[in-house]
Amino acid sequence: MVHTSAQAVLQQLEEAGYSAYLVGGCVRDLLLGKQPDDYDMTTSARPEEVLALFAPHAIPTGLQHGTVTVRRGGESFEITTFRADGTYSDGRHPDAVTFSRRLEDDLQRRDFTVNAMAMDRRGQLTDLYGGQEDLRRGVIRCVGNAETRFAEDALRIMRGLRFAAVLGFSIEEQTAQAMIACRYRLEQIAAERLQVEMTKLLCGRDAGEILLRFPQVIGVFMPEILPCVGFTQHSRWHCYDVWEHICRSVDAAPVQPLLRWTMLLHDIAKPVCFTQDEAGAGHFYGHPQRGVEMAQEIMHRLRFDKRSQQRIETLIAWHDREIPRTERGVRRALHALGEEALRQLIEVKRADNRAQHPDCREFMQQQIDRAEEIMERLLEKESCFRVAQLAVNGRDLLALGLQGAQIGAALEAALEQVLEGALPNEKESLLAWISEHKKP
Ligand code: ATP
Ligand code: MG
């Protein structure tokens, strides 16, 4: 079951007198019957020895960590010398990397039992920590003492939550307790790393369950979520508290990072916007707008790219508006958002609604389907939702005798007519209308 080019690389190392194995995530994935994304290898050979053996197909990509990348059969393999990591003082990186001649040292430094197995080129497994058994039972468990391992490197806390969400595994009790006990160490972890792990977690099949169970861990770098936990909504639309609603909405959204993040953030301002009327019903006036501001801060802190950030803000701002159910309404939404964002908004509305009270699902889902049908129909027969898509342009209007600012204004007015459905997007009718209404 070991990949052929990988086998050849392992064999070459063995024939040169070294031991060599596949290790870590690829072994885990092979045992799960999944295609690994990449093949990491570990060997007794020192980095210089690996470089010499595979020259000129070897590149020293991370010599300080002992990593050499070897190209073979159109693929890249990362080969790292057996390491023993020793002590950690900064909560993230070992103080010194020590190379070892023993596989056991290398497996011992790895984070979880399911990630701490090695496989030789014949498929023979070295499993010193019960990784196979944990894979079979679906358990994430630290190698060694969980608190010690999280104190060495707190990123492992987020990696553990991420693996549990992605693989649909449970977290062994002591590992779970240590995640909570050590959570404040996440303050030392770079924001970019937290964002990457959080995105993978959110895209996992059990994202909602993990979020629901570990809000206090996520809350270390996103304290804004904490007031949502257990916050009763007092609303006939909702049978879950704000946090559970958020978690369920994440699961209900398509598996795309942008949509999953939008769901995580969409109702974050509900607690600060909460009011209750005389009848006792809860309201959250202004929570989309306030939510945009809070989400902006969170995404800035976690170093989101500008484009994703802006789109997520737009979707949060629009998530609670009524979905348009007329051609005119959908044209206006296409004008304001563009096709891509309107499609995303439709998914956000669906996910939001699926996480609401079951009694108000069917009707809303039908309304959303209806909006989508109208959008598809419009996009098929029409394609004018912006000035640039009008069948007339500035030059046509110059020819009509309009000048300067009149031109822009006339185009805007003509687009308005098209969006209203009052005029077809055809040159002749547009010019006729402009001549009649907009000529000086
Ligand atoms: P994926 O590539 O699917 O994210 P992976 O398990 O391959 O999962 P990598 O980040 O590629 O994760 O790391 C490869 C291996 O290195 C892991 O399987 C694990 O054995 C080890 N490892 C990675 N990060 C750490 C860490 N912070 N602490 C201890 N071991 C780690
Ligand atoms: Mg990997």
Image (cartoon, rainbow, N blue to C red):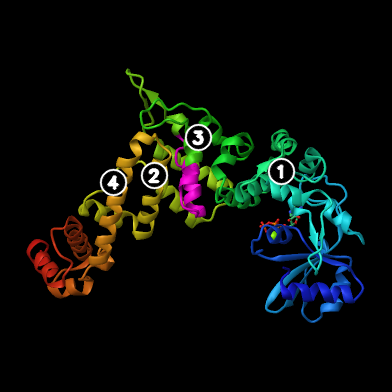
Pair 1/3: label in front: 3
Are there few (<14), some (14-19), or many (20+) residues within 10 Å of tag 2?
some
- Ligand 1 within 8 Å of disc 2? The answer is no
Three-letter amino acid code at the position of disc 3? Glu
Pair 1/4: label in front: 4
Q: Secondary structure at mark 1?
A: helix
Mark sitting earlier along the chain (1/3): 1
Cα–Cα gap, marks 4 and 3: 24 Å
Q: Residue 32 appears at what percent x and percent y?
A: 67, 57
Q: Secondary structure at mark 3?
A: helix
Mark sitting earlier along the chain (3/2): 3
Residue lying at 22% horizontally and 60% vertically, measured from the top left: 412
Q: Residue 356 appears at what percent x and percent y?
A: 40, 36
Q: Which of the 4 quarters of the picture holds residue 70? A: bottom right
- Relative to residue 278, is residue 174 depicted above or below? below
Cα–Cα gap, marks 2 and 4: 20 Å
Q: Mark number for residue 367?
A: 4
Mark sitting earlier along the chain (2/4): 2
